[in-house]
Image: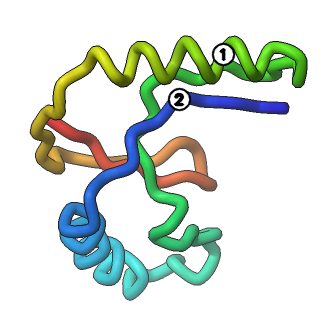
Amino acid sequence: MRLFAAVLPPPERLDELGQVVDRLHRLPGADGVRWTARAGWHLTLAFMGEVEDAALPELRARLERAASRTPPFSLRLHGGGHFGRRALWAGVA
């Protein structure tokens, strides 16, 4: 399966981003974009590509250890753009 490691933003940041996305929905051509629900919005940390199912338990344990050693950190929305014609992204700082 295709996997990536990600941070899920807190609800208030999703609301902030949602206000911008709501405006983007009104732009010409927006009806040709496949929009994802807020529940799918995330900050990708690492894309791992195809991973064998057998590797999942060890990978999960390692990611849990790494996450437990990382203190909470602050982010703010900063810029954005698109990958081709299919995916929009928002930057963080």
Q: CA distance from mark 1 to mark 2?
A: 10 Å
7 relative to 4 in the view: left or right: left
- Rate crowding at label 2 as few (under 14), some (14 to 19) or many (20 or more) other CA atoms within 10 Å: some
60 relative to 92 in the view: left or right: right
Name the front one of labels 1 and 2: 1
Residue at the spot 40% in from the left edge and 14% down from the top edge: 66
**Viewport quadrant of the N terminus:** top right
Q: Is residue 69 above or below residue 13?
A: above
> Which of pointers 1 and 2 lies earlier in the amino acid sequence?
2
Residue located beneath label 1 in the image: 59
- Name the residue nearer the viewer: 52 or 30: 52
Residue located beneath label 2 in the image: 5
Q: Position of residue 19 (x, y in %)?
A: 24, 78
Residue at the spot 48% in from the left edge and 23% down from the top edge: 64
21 relative to 57 in the view: left or right: left
- Rate crowding at label 1 as few (under 14), some (14 to 19) or many (20 or more) other CA atoms within 10 Å: few
Q: Position of residue 89 (x, y in %)?
A: 41, 48
Please give the count of numbered marks on the rendered protein.
Answer: 2
The amino acid beneath tag 1 is Leu
Q: Dividing the picture into quarters, in which one does residue 18 lie?
A: bottom left
**Viewport quadrant of the C terminus:** top left
The amino acid beneath tag 2 is Ala
Residue at the spot 25% in from the left edge and 74% down from the top edge: 15
SS at circle 2 = strand
SS at circle 1 = helix
Q: Dividing the picture into quarters, in which one does residue 14 lie?
A: bottom left
Residue at the spot 53% in from the left edge and 42% down from the top edge: 83
- Name the residue nearer the viewer: 57 or 33: 57
Q: Which disc, if any, is residue 80?
A: none
